[in-house]
Amino acid sequence: MKAKHALSAIALAAAALNGWAAGGQDLIKQQCVACHAVTKPEKATLDRLWERKGPDLHYAGLKFNRDWMVGWLQNPTVIRAGGVLPPKAAKGADGKGPDTVDPAQLAPHPKLSAADATAVADALMALKPEGLVEKGAFKNEPVNASFASMLFSKLRGCTSCHSSKPNAGGISGPELYTAGDRLQPDYVVAYVKDPHKFDPHVWMPRLELNDADVQKLAGYISTLKSAEKK
Amino acid sequence: MIRTGFKRAALGFALLSAAAGAAAQEPHANAIKNYNTYCVQCHGVNRDGNGINSRDMAVKPRDHTDTKAMADTPDETLFKSIKGGGLAVSKSVLMPKWEGVLNDDQIKEMVSYLRFVSKTTSK
């Protein structure tokens, strides 16, 4: 009798979970797919990258931390200060210093309610295609913070396009000063090693760093967390 | 009447020059697309080294409109720096290697486009 109850409780819970996830999927269909690819694009061309309005999410479950997503979807911050496609947003300053970013190209991300953010994050976390990210690739070895920071800024040139603290460094790549909250370290390892596995034309270069460098950089990036939580 | 004629001639000339400008860029269409995808962030919309990323760089990106400096740089150096990054030509690590997304033919097209931008000839 007890077993029967337990079973029906499990069945009920499973049904509730399914309903929950389905809600997230519906929300994604209604609100996300206009800008984000949630399935692998059939033709991964350079033109597609020029036309897309938001970053690809078809591997979101391998990339993001769930809790970060739940929070960010309710209170989105600017991750790509140079726009989704920096070349589209950049405006020449005609000899008067660096190019500027056209604010019209920086459309704010919609805000979701807590319930919707949770449902969407859970549905996105289910997007885990095979073959992109090796589980356990990040070894989590102790990192010498000042050396790793130097690798990032001076020795390997990451800082050309990425910022490790607000308002310092490049802006064409996503900011990394909240990357420790945002990204799964295994994903960082896989992406740094070969960004073109995720998209063959994306402008993150494949630097062919040795594994020790990749581990140190991923370790360093995992320590970059938003100031609010410190 | 004469004035209108002059205006028309001026307009015609302007149109012709614009067309000539477009025609001169046409053989570089692929390189321009690639430049605008991979290079413009640092080298700038005006190709003058003033990209959106350039503000905080310890070494400023090369100004591709600098005729003098570009004339002094051999094709081989340009090719190597695009393919293998700044370190491949003893320059800044801030310039990454692009061989992962650009093949040799595309890099050659880019070198030829840089000659066009800098108003220099192959060296």
Image (cartoon, rainbow, N blue to C red):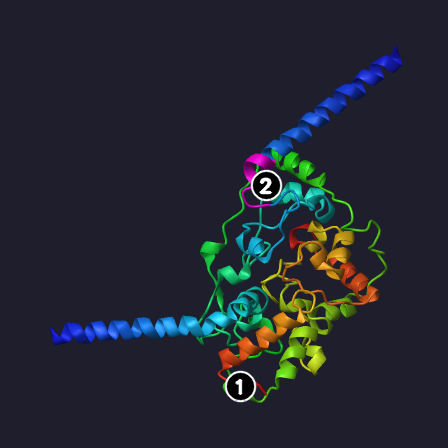
Q: Residue A14: x and y, percent?
A: 76, 24
- Based on the displayed image, in which of its 4 quarters is residue B24 positioned? bottom left
What amino acid type should be assigned to the residue bearing mark 1?
Answer: Thr
The residue lying toward the viewer, choosing from B122 and A229, is: B122
Q: Which span is picked out in magenta? A: A28-36
Residue A223 visible within the image: no
- Based on the displayed image, in which of its 4 quarters is residue A113 positioned? top right
Q: Residue A206: x and y, percent?
A: 71, 65
* Rendered view: A172 above or below B44: above
**Residue A29 drawn in magenta:** yes
Q: Which mark is residue A74?
A: 2
Q: Bin the neighbour count of mark 1 within 10 Å (Cα to Cα): few under 14, some 14-19, many 20 and up.
A: some
* Rendered view: B44 above or below A47: below
* Rendered view: A9 above or below B37: above
**Residue B28 drawn in magenta:** no
The residue lying toward the viewer, choosing from A204 and A230, is: A204
Q: Secondary structure at mark 2?
A: helix
What amino acid type should be assigned to the residue bearing mark 2?
Answer: Gln
Labels 1 and 2 positioned on one and the same chain: no
Residue at 36% across, 72% down? B18
**Measured Cα–Cα span from mark 1 to mark 2:** 55 Å
Residue at 50% across, 81% down? B118
Query: Which chain hosts label 1?
Result: B
Residue at 40% across, 74% down? B21
Q: Residue tagged by mark 1?
A: B121
Q: Residue B60: x and y, percent?
A: 58, 78
- Left or right: B46, with A152 as reference point: left
Residue at 17% across, 74% down? B5
